Image (cartoon, grey):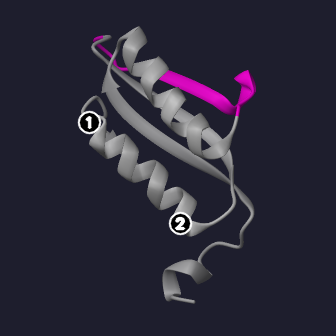
Amino acid sequence: MTDADELFQFPCEFPIKVMGRDSESFRSLTLAIVERHAGPLAAESITERLSRKGRFLALTYTIRAESRAQLDRIYQELTDSGVVLVSL
């Protein structure tokens, strides 16, 4: 177990935040990636916030994280997607 693993006790509720250009394809692609690794999400587990000028969208998916490896896989696939500008 590493120091990073000790920060979280799995399983736990974990917010995954992604930002990208506001489009339906951004929403659907990021949701598909998260659900592929975490299972179906209820509507109340997803929040969105539009940028001031409406060009960018921030989405937060709150999942039940089972392991650090699961989170690593999600973040890697989001990064590789090409539509995510920032993920936290």
**Label 2 close to label 1 by CB (< 8 Å):** no
Q: Which residues are magenta?
A: 40-53
Q: Please, is residue 14 above or below residue 35 in the view?
A: below
Q: Amino acid at mark 2?
A: Ala
Indicate the position of residue 73 as horizontal and vertical percent values. Answer: 46, 55
Circle 1 crowding by C-alpha within 10 Å: few under 14, some 14–19, many from 20: some
Front-lying residue, 65 or 19: 65
Q: Amino acid at mark 1?
A: Leu
Circle 2 crowding by C-alpha within 10 Å: few under 14, some 14–19, many from 20: few
Disc number at residue 85? Answer: 1
Residue at 31% x, 34% y is 84
Residue at 52% x, 57% y is 71
Indicate the position of residue 65 as horizontal and vertical percent values. Answer: 66, 56
Disc number at residue 31? Answer: none
Tell which circle, 2 or 1, labels the residue nearer the N-terminal end: 2
Numbered marks: total: 2
